[in-house]
Image (tube, helix red, strand yellow):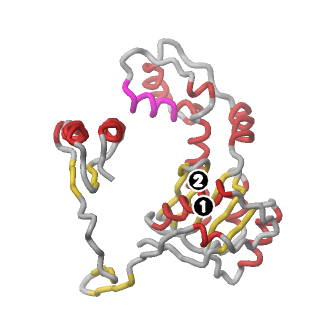
Amino acid sequence: DKVDEQTAKILKREVSDGIIAPGYDEKALEILKQKKGGKYLILEGDVSYKPPTNEYREVYGLVFAQKRNDTVVTKKMFENVVSKNKDYPDSAVIDGILATICAKYTQSNSVGFSKGGQMVGVGAGQQSRVDCVKLAGSKLRIWSLRQHPKVRGLKFKKGIKRVERLNARLQYIDENDMTGPERKAWLQYFDEPPKSLTEQEKKDFLKDDLTGVTLASDAFFPFRDNIDVAAKFGVKYIAQPGGSTRDSAVTSAADEYGMVMVHHGIRVFHH
């Protein structure tokens, strides 16, 4: 679809270096031309383009070739529920599709957390898959705590820009980690120091908010530690290819937490 005026207005305020789209409305194009002082890269994609079957990478004179990952992620992939809990609502299937598509285009190793039809945490490019889960989980935690009433209710001075407000909220969430000079600079955003968000308040909020989360992986989970970590972030649904020699142990771990696990059989590695 063409980029319309409303979409362009959203893109204008978000951080990015460029856009590729099938087309642009006249008003949308004028808005995007103003982004980054006129240096925003705007490209029109060819909707009729058909990519080649194989992809190639050259490394010091060696050429690697592989078939392009043309997998289309569909609901049918999520029918093989291997866990004891078979209660897999359509909303969770949609989250699983979204997170799997995200993993397909994210640097491996990668996992993604989704909830309510949106990505809420991505862990990518790690050598250890459990580190991916921990990284994505830390982002999920921040995403959730950004919804806390104390965070949303921060009173900024007039004139504080949107990005500065965002960064200040992130600092506030982990206020105890700030250095002395960092805290001094942070306080300049407010007319008076905000009341701290206590660790107990965070714990209570996360306990209520982090429920029904979906986790998808671009390849199989080799050990149960991935499941144990995922459980700490409210994961209820897991989508993965399966195929590990330890599949049964990983599935048993999911059963211990009452999770729903799907093996769809498709690795979506991206290198």
Query: Is the C-beta separation of discs 1 and 2 under 8 Å?
Result: yes
The vertical placement of 238 against 173, above or below, is below
Which image quadrant for residue 241?
bottom right
Q: Which residue is mark 2?
A: 114
For disc 2, the neighbor class at 10 Å (few under 14, some 14 to 19, many from 20) is: many
Q: Quadrant of the C terminus?
A: bottom left
Q: Which residues are magenta?
A: 161-170
Q: Is residue 271 above or below residue 235?
A: below
* Residue 54 image offset from top left, x and y in percent: 33, 83
Which amino acid, mark 1? Gly
Please provide percent x and percent y for residue 5: 30, 38
Residue 78 relative to residue 270: left or right: right
Front one among 198 and 54: 54
Taking the image as shown, residue 83 lies to the left or right of residue 32, namely right
Image vertical order of residue 170 relative to residue 250, above or below? above
Of residues 196 and 254, the one nearer the viewer is 254
Residue located 62% across and 64% down the image: 130
